[in-house]
Amino acid sequence: MRIAPFLFLAVPLAAVAARASEPTPGRQRELVHLVRQDCGSCHGMQLTGGLGLPLTAEALRDKPLEGLEATIHGGRPGTAMPPWKSILSDAEIRWIVEKLMTGFPKE
């Protein structure tokens, strides 16, 4: 059991990795602006719906996080929802979804 002594490092290293993948505060402000402006053009400037469905915490409450991430990543073929995978990283998409599900910040 030579590995056992190193197990105590697993949790702190995982926490550091999670923080490292979170967008910087400056990038977070850019993402808020992007969502409010670009996503807001279809989902409403307050994200309460328009051409696209509402993106409020209440509307997304029962939606799986992974499904929302997949929609942002790959878009919805046959709809106005474009893929964002060439513009946003997986970590940025996750950050956006987590914020949408808890109440998206104002600009």
Image (spheres, rainbow, N blue to C red):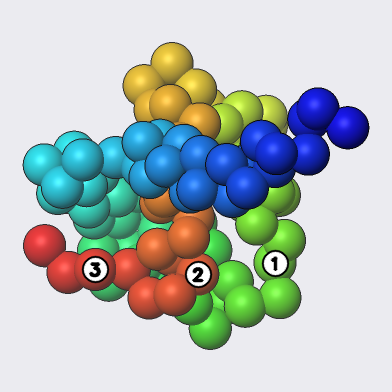
Residue that carries the numbered disc 1 in the rendered image = 63
Mark 1 falls on what kind of element? Answer: loop
> Is 24 or 53 nearer to us in this picture?
24
Residue that carries the numbered disc 2 in the rendered image = 101
Left/right of residue 94 with respect to residue 3 in the rendered view: left
Identity of the residue drawn at 61% across and 28% down: 74
Residue 33 at x, y percent in the picture: 17, 49
Identity of the residue drawn at 15% across and 47% down: 25
Quarter of image, res 7: top right
Residue that carries the numbered disc 3 in the rendered image = 105
Residue 28 at x, y percent in the picture: 22, 47
Q: Give the mark count.
A: 3
Separation of marks 3 and 2 at Cα, in angstroms: 11 Å
- Type of residue at label 3? Pro
- Type of residue at label 1? Lys
Quarter of image, res 9: top right
105 is higher (above) or lower (below) than 71 = below
Residue 105 at x, y percent in the picture: 24, 68
Q: Are marks 1 and 3 in contact (CB under 8 Å)?
A: no
Q: Are marks 2 and 1 in contact (CB under 8 Å)?
A: yes
Identity of the residue drawn at 70% across and 66% down: 63
- Type of residue at label 2? Met
